[in-house]
Image (tube, rainbow, N blue to C red):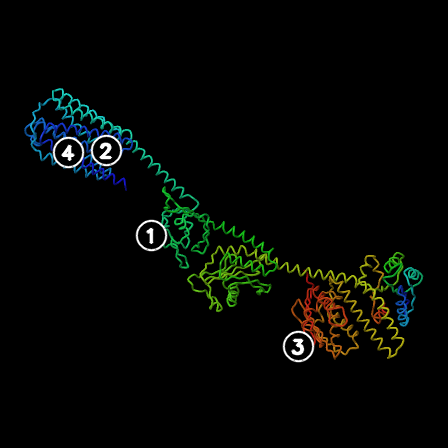
Amino acid sequence: MKNILIIDDDREFVQELEDILKNAGHSVDIAFDGINGFDLIKKGKYDLILLDYKMDKINGVELLKKIKVNNLTGKIIIISATVNIETCLEEADVKDLVVTICYKPFNIENFLQKITSI
Amino acid sequence: MEIVEIEKKRKILEIFFVSVLISCISIISIFHFRLFYFLSEILNIILSFILFLSVRDVRKDVSLRYLTIIGFSYFYISIISIISLASLEGLDLTAGLNNYHLMQLPLAGSFIQAGSFLAAAFFIDKKANSNFVFFTQTLCFFIILSLILSNIIFPVENINRSVPVLLCNIIEYFNCFLLIIALFIFFKKRQFIGQFIFIIISISIVISFFSDLFYVMDNNTESIICIAGQIFKILPAYLVYKIVSEQKIEKINKYEEITKILGEKEEMLRMILKNLPIGVWILNQKGEIVDSNPESKSIWKDCSYISYDLSNRRHNWMFDSGERIIPSGWDIMKVIIENEPIVNCNMEIFTKDGLLKIILNTAVPLKNSENQIIGAVVIIKNITSRFMREKRIETSNILFRLLEKCLTLREYLNEALNLINQLGRFKYSGIHLLNKENEISYESYTGFIEDQNNFIRKIKRHSDIEEIEYMTKGGSIYFNNLQNEKIVMDNSGKDIGFSSVAIIPILYGSRIIGVIHLGDDKGLRITSNFIEFLEDISPIIGEGINKYYMDEKIHRTQKELELAGRISDIGTLTATIAHEIRNPLATIKMAAYNIRKKSQSPNIEKHISNIEKKISESEQIINNLLFYSRINSVEYQEIRIYDILNESLDLIMERFKSQDVDLIRNYNLLSDKIVECDPVLIRELIDNILCNAYESVTDKKGIIEIGSKYINETIYQIYINDNGNGIDEEDLKRIYEPFFTNKKRGTGLGLCVCKQIVSLHKGEIQIENNKNEGITVNIFLPYKRIFE
């Protein structure tokens, strides 16, 4: 049972993911953009943050930078359809914040296992 | 001819005139002695006058012949004076010895004078080489002698003896003596003494003139004629003196000087000939060598032309082939026969130790003053090294031009071979190229039939190991067997045989990339400098060949680049599309997952699994597209290949769990092996191949075996074997081409990606149809990363 924040602008994806996570017994908060997500991170205490890499307004990397600047902590999993984003993370010097990266479309069972184990 | 005729006629007339004259005088002497005496003195005058005229004429061009005439003339005069002396005393020729002592001296003097004049005339005549004069004068002498003998008793005429007559007679003695010495010294060429003697003679003649004069004053008027005779004697004597002192001696000196100069000149010419750096021959009209210089001998020294032995010279032109070239068959005879100079004509000769010499010949006809050809001068020059150098440059240039002219390697080699044929004129010639495995990958040859060609190959292989000692420095092998015994090196050469064979390596750098081979069965000699020449140009041919290899490579690379460019464009597009599709795919996948969870209905389950399967297929397509456009580098990690295989297999089984397939794992060999590779790429590789395998067995019970084999310490093999439908043989060639597929769906990139992954790892992939059914994919990969 984990407190999870999903930050993703793909509403259908978020809905399905929320369903899956809730079914798995986790509690889920949602933010549809980076700014909103950042506010939630500042306010609440989440065990895990699922962050989309590519978003409008503020994208994943920028959000991560913001988190780092504000000295906020939290286990962050990046969810992305784009491969090879490690380099982008490294360039922005935010890799240390990221626990793991899940490439879309991922294997749901494995994904759930990973969340539980973290 | 005419000159000789006239000379003969003149001689006959001379004999006739002299005979008639002497006969007339003799007949007169019988009837009237005084008249005879008178006539004899007249004759004396005439002779002296003739002498004077002749000597005057010959002053311009003195000849010994005229001196002969002078000698004989004085002889006659002496005879006449004997007769006159004998007649004056009325004595016979011998009587004077007994009766009148005073007459002994003039008589004997006249005899000696006559003898000495005759001897001198003979002597000069012999020198002058005019025997005709000798015979004429001898004949005259005998006529006179017979006349004297027929008139032994002469009419007696009383004459008073007086001192002047005695003086005259004594002077005659002295005269004779001096004349003999003069002639002797004259022919010994002591010119100064000769001059002196002639002066003395002249003085003695002057004295005898005065003695005669006194005699006349003593009332012997008839002796006036004698004085006239003496006077005329002085003139020729003086003229003879002039000839000898001025011209004759001068001529002799001139002749000696000219001889000396000529000798020096000849010596100089000889020296020039001897030291000339070019060879010179002097030929006679028959084309035989009459003179030659040392250089010409050294040029021909070691050649099949054997010697300069004069007695044997016609047989010198023996070539090893047994062909004989006689001088008349020689090109240089053209110069003598047709009067046509040969200028800078090249000639090839072979030396005994197998060298080819190139000789530059120039020959011009030798003509005498009447423009007749009497022989020829031949100038020869050894231009072998220059010729070879020029030929090398020329051939290199041609070979370079060929590179532009010939579009293909085949064309180039054919042209190069033509060139070698033109130079060498061998009956058989060929070029063989070797590939990296030392197999003959290309051949071009003329003359050789297939069997002979095998023979050449055998020589080549033979030579690599055992025949090293025959090799030249450049690595060529050649044989000459000019006894017409065919070389048989191997059974395959038995039927054909060659009289000469050569193999020359074609080098690129230090690597042998092919061979040139030459052969002849007619005794054409392979010379060591021709081999050297070929060794020199072979690297140029090598470069040429390599250029075509490079062209081919560039062409191939260009094609690859073109494809890569095309793929790269497609890559950018597909990457964008793939990313955009992955997002909805993820949502669909999760939605399906949620549906399954929520419905828990077996009716829906079937549809859900279809959706999942198709999602998985889509993922695979996207992955391949992305991979194809993305992969170009390998990120090496040290991993257990065994684990990767297991993961891949687990995943694939999961993906194709609806399909009835026996997946046999047979790769325990790799269980503890750590290999260096890119795990992502290797996973992709295995996924792709297994996917193909699964797809090929959809319509039956599938058996897929994945296993490994040990190859060596550096390479391992993974094979994936299925019992599917296999691949058409025709398609087998094209399966690695991007976008080639015979599936209804699919990008046609799967195996292309596989090939790329394997070659990025410096491995190899082979796909072959099984004997019964299905295919086997063999992948060979190195354990350790291979650096370029």
Write the residue at 77% across / 79% down.
B660
Residue under pointer 3: B771
Q: Name the mark on residue B22.
A: 4
Report the chain holding disc 1.
Answer: B
Q: Earlier in the sequence, mark 3 or mark 2?
A: 2
Pointers 4 and 1 in contact (CB under 8 A)? Answer: no
Q: Nearer the viewer, mark 1 or mark 3?
A: 1
Please tell me if label 3 and label 2 are on a single chain: yes
Other residues around mark 4 within 10 Å, as few (<14) / some (14–19) / many (≥20): some
| N-terminal-most mark, 4 or 2 | 4
Measured from the top left, where is residue B739 in percent x and y? 74, 67
Q: Amino acid at mark 3?
A: Lys
- Identify the secondary structure beneath mark 2: helix
Residue B665 is situated, as x and y percent measured from the top left of the image, at: 72, 75
Q: Quadrant of residue B329?
A: bottom left
User: In this view of the protein, which residue sits in the foreground, B650 or B457?
Assistant: B457
Q: Which residue is mark 1?
A: B311
From the viewer's perspective, is residue B631 above or below residue A24?
A: above
Do badges 4 and 2 share one subunit? Answer: yes
Residue matched to label 2 = B67
Sooner in the amino-acid sequence: mark 1 or mark 2: 2
Disc 1 and disc 3 on one polypeptide chain: yes
Mark found first going from the N terminus, 3 or 4:
4
Name the image quarter holding residue B718: bottom right
Tell which residue pokes out farthest to the right in this image: A43
Residue type for callout 4: Ile
Give me the C-alpha separation between circle 4 and circle 1: 61 Å
